[in-house]
Structure formats: C-alpha cells, structure tokens
Image: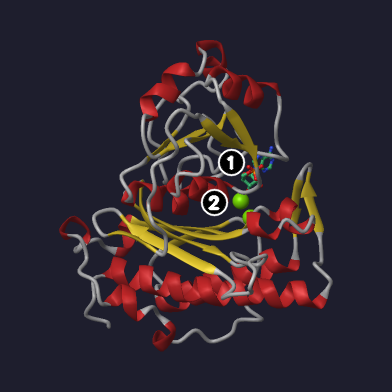
Amino acid sequence: MSSSPLLMRLLSASVGLSHRAGKIIRDIIKTGDLGIHDKGFDDLQTEADRSVQRCIIGSLQQHFPKISIVGEEDLSYDSEMQKFLEKDFSQDVLALNCPDNLKNVKENEVIVWVDPLDGTKEFTQGLLDHVTVLIGISVNGNAVGGVVYQPYYNYQAQPPTTLGRCIWGMVGLGTHGMEKKSPPEGKNIITTTRSHSDPKVAGAITACEPTEVMRVGGAGHKVLLVCEGIAHAYVFASKGCKKWDTCAPEGILRAMGGSLTDLHGNDIVYRLDVPRPNLTGVVATLENHDWYINKIPEDIKALFAAPS
Ligand code: AMP
Ligand code: MG
Ligand code: MG
C-alpha cells in the first residue's frame, strides 16, 4: 500500500472516505434535525456539511500531512474525528496502475478540494438526489481526478435497491461507477442552477438555444448529468461556483474525455493563490465544447473578464 504512487493512495483514501461521508449524511437525515446555519445570502450550512468535512479533511490530514487541502466550510478539526484506517482505503483503486505522467507527483504539487455536501439548499428542501460529496484532486493547478458520491442515488427506486453511488476517475485511468453516454441527438438539453439564477445566468442559457433546460441543484449533480448524457451542457454565467464545486466533477469529466472550462473556454486554475470563486463562470460538456463557448454572447463574457 505505502509503495503505491501518492496519487493512487490519495484517490483510494478519497473513495473510502466518500462512502463514510455518505453514511454520515444519511444518519443525520434520520435524526430529523439538520442543524441549519445561514452563512450569508443564499448560502446554507448544515450539520451534515460540518460533520462530513471534519471526517474527510481530518482523515486526509492524518494520512497525507504534507498535502494542501481546501474545504468549503470554516471549521476546526480537533474533535469528532473518527479513526479512518488504511484498511478502509479502496482496494479497487490501489489495484490499478497509476498513469505514467502522474506516477512521480509529489505532495507539494497536490491540492485536494473538498465540498463535503454540494447542493445544500436542495438538501434542506428534501431534494436528496441533487446532493453529492465532492473530493477533487489537482496537480500543479490542473484538475486530474476526483470522487463524486451521491448518498441518495436510488432512493426512490422501486423495488428498493442499494442506496448511494460512488463515481471516481483520474485522467489517464478512466472513470468508474458510471457509464459514459452521449447525449440524445436532435436535442440540446442544458442544465443549470435552480436556486442561484439571475439575468446573466438566464441570458447565457438562452443564447445556447436549448430545446430543454434542466434546473437542478449542485455542481456535482449537474456535471454527472453531462457525463451520463442526460444533459448536453452545464452552463453557469455566474461567479457563485467555487473551486471545491468544480474540481472533483472536472476530474471525472476529463477522465471521460469531456471538458470543463470557464465561459471563455479557458481552464480553471486550481491553485492556492487564485480566488476560491470561479469568477469567469463554468461550462461543462462531454462533446462540442467550443460550440457552447462560441454561442455565449460577448457582452455576457465581458462581465466575466478573464484575469490579465
Ligand atoms: P447550484 O447550481 O445553484 O446548486 O450551485 C452550484 C454550487 O455553487 C453550489 O455549491 C452552490 O452553493 C454554489 N453557488 C452557486 N451560486 C452561488 C451563489 N450565488 N452564492 C453562493 N453559492 C453559490
Ligand atoms: Mg457546493
Ligand atoms: Mg457545500
């Protein structure tokens, strides 16, 4: 195990932790008290966001003390930490060969981006299938892999079946837990926010000539809709999405051959000296990325000027 390359150990720990995170979220729902706290306008935090972040970041710090980890919530880590052992790492991940270009990555090149619960607003409204746990891995500023866990995947299935789904991937290694599927021909389904819209968000969508708009919660959830061919594109002309919202989904989408960029078609840079919000917006597709970038009007793009 300790002989595996750093990125494989990190991915295998992240997969194991995402399963534990899913259980924490489901257990908190069962208590009936979400412990909702308002961090500001349209930005909620619950006990699930707090407990899951403590679990994921506390555990990753214990196993990878030299790696930088950025989490959405502002928390301390000195209590409520359950022991996460190496035996809980995903053996499926460790069994795979690390892509050659990532074999020698060092701790100081890696940042892990954690959104303990993406889609909190929808979570508090009972839209449980919009919720994901996001653990993204960047190397030298690029999203190279990640884990997206859906704690309530299958929760309305009849007959009832296993609850929860873990999707993980790494560029050069592929994606596991989900089949890549092209979106339907003859349609143009665009997914976007349901709770953080404004005229710019709406204007960019309209310009992309959708045949249907899917307004759902969570950046993780929306990128998965793109990965599974349920939507053609996720378009978000807003500064509201943060690096922890996009890193994990981008790693998985890129591992499938898709693209996640800003509104200008530029890569999102995952470094500590870059602002946490994605100030130049987000566009994610499996195919025809440039078509969407070209459709977004210049006057909207100008409101999201790329930093010089
Ligand atoms: P949504 O598509 O609205 O679920 O947003 C995707 C992610 O970005 C979620 O983590 C949201 O909390 C975050 N987000 C998007 N827009 C905003 C905003 N205006 N204020 C705060 N967070 C936002
Ligand atoms: Mg989020
Ligand atoms: Mg969150």
Q: Residues within 10 Å of mark 1 (few under 14, many from 20)?
A: many
Q: Residues within 10 Å of mark 2 (few under 14, many from 20)?
A: many
Give the residue type that dot 2 points to. Answer: Gly
Extreme left residue here? 100
On the image, which quarter does residue 35 sit in?
A: bottom right
Q: Is residue 238 visible?
A: no
Q: Amino acid at mark 1?
A: Cys
Q: Is mark 1 within 8 Å of ligand 1?
A: yes
Would residue 287 be found to the left or right of residue 148 on screen? left
Q: Residue tagged by mark 1? A: 241
Q: Is residue 177 left or right of residue 44?
A: left
Residue 196 image offset from top left, x and y in percent: 70, 37
Residue 220, disc: 2
Residue at position x 29%, y 53% from top? 171
Answer left or right for 250 relative to 199. Answer: left
Mark 1 and mark 2 in contact (Cβ < 8 Å)?
no
**What colour-coding does the image apply?**
secondary structure
